[in-house]
Image (tube, helix red, strand yellow):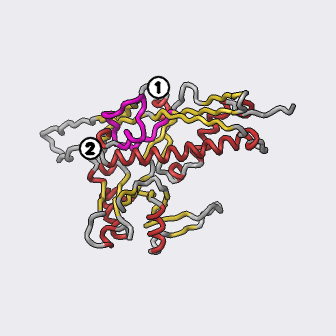
């Protein structure tokens, strides 16, 4: 009888776990665009325990300068601190496939497994991030970074175009130059392309062309919210989202049902995807870790950075 190569023969957890994390990051458009930036400090905090991660920060210096005098002293000021709070995502997924080992019997079975699982976790991270953004932009003190033009009177005024985009990014004031990328629904990207508002730039490394809108890298993602004809588009600065990678107690497990001939792969993730400067309040979280629906809940978020330091803008608009 032929010996069957099972997934337990292919997966070596100590090798697979770092490979999976690396491949997931490689496949992420959000990371490659610079919107999401891995943060070594958050890596450490994500492994320290607890479902809420406290990230203290120094606030900007305040007070006017003073005229020097030979008969008086300068007024002494102080630097103050604030606290950002990130929520730890504790997620997992299991698969059972009868003929998985056969499908993975190519030259690099480990790479094939990593590709399949890495693609899955990349999609899940992007979906989670959209829910994070939905909640964060609806949170306390975030209205100054939201441009809702969907109810404007004329078509030009309520649709995304060069004029409405420039108006939206002006919410960042003189910090608008930090914005580098824009995430939009594919229908929005198609609408802009039909109006010749998307530029296609060749990539120096021979990769597919880079799409830009008003000089910003375009990321198409159909997870961007759509409701009653209103589309939500996000504009980001580099590093607007911080990412930390924790370690689940048992990140990867394999098993085999010998009677059914099924191979089982279980993956578990502990990670952070946090909009810098918008603290997670955890007011309405029922489980050990917030769900996507709870991440999208406005009551769970509050801005703690100054507006110009948030590095992202939300636009609610129509398409013709």
Label 1 neighbour load within 10 Å: few <14, some 14-19, many 20+: few
Q: Which residues are magenta?
A: 270-296
Nearer to us of marks 2 and 1 is 2
Q: Residue furthest left?
A: 71
Q: Which mark is residue 140?
A: 2
Label 2 neighbour load within 10 Å: few <14, some 14-19, many 20+: some
Q: Which mark is residue 256?
A: none
Q: Which residue occupies the foreground of this view, 285 or 168?
A: 285
Question: On the image, numbered disc 1 is attached to which residue?
Answer: 48
Dot 2 or dot 1, earlier in sequence: 1
- Residue 58 in magenta stretch: no
Res 249 quadrant in image: top right
State the residue at coordinates (22%, 37%): 77
Quadrant of the image containing the N terminus: top right
Q: Which residue occupies the foreground of this view, 320 or 126?
A: 320
Q: Secondary structure at mark 2?
A: loop
């Amino acid at each position: 009888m032929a010996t069957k190569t099972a997934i337990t023969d292919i997966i070596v957890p100590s090798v697979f776990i770092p490979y999976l994390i690396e491949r997931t990051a490689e496949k992420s458009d959000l990371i490659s665009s610079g919107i999401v930036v891995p943060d070594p400090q958050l890596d450490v905090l994500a492994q320290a325990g607890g479902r809420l991660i406290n990230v203290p920060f120094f606030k900007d210096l305040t007070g006017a300068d003073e005229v020097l005098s030979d008969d008086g002293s300068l007024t002494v000021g102080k630097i103050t601190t604030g606290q950002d709070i990130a929520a730890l995502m504790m997620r997992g997924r299991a698969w059972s496939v009868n003929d998985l080992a056969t499908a993975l019997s190519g030259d690099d079975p480990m790479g094939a497994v990593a590709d399949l699982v890495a693609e899955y976790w990349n999609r899940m991270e992007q979906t989670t991030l959209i829910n994070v953004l939905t909640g964060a932009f609806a949170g306390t003190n975030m209205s100054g970074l939201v441009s809702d033009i969907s109810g404007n009177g004329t078509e030009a005024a309520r649709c995304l175009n060069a004029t409405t985009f420039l108006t939206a990014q002006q919410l960042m004031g003189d910090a608008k130059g930090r914005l580098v990328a824009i995430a939009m629904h594919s229908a929005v990207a198609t609408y802009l392309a039909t109006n010749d508002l998307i530029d296609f730039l060749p990539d120096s490394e021979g990769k597919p062309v880079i799409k830009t809108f008003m000089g910003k890298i375009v990321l198409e993602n159909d997870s961007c919210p759509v409701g009653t004809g209103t589309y939500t588009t996000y504009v980001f600065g580099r590093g607007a989202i911080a990412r930390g990678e924790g370690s689940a107690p048992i990140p990867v497990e394999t098993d085999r049902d010998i009677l059914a001939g099924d191979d089982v792969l279980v993956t578990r993730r502990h990670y952070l995807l946090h909009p810098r400067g918008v603290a997670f309040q955890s007011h309405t979280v029922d489980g050990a870790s917030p769900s996507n629906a709870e991440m999208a809940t406005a009551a769970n978020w509050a801005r703690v950075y100054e507006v110009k330091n948030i590095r992202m803008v939300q636009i609610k608009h129509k398409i013709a």
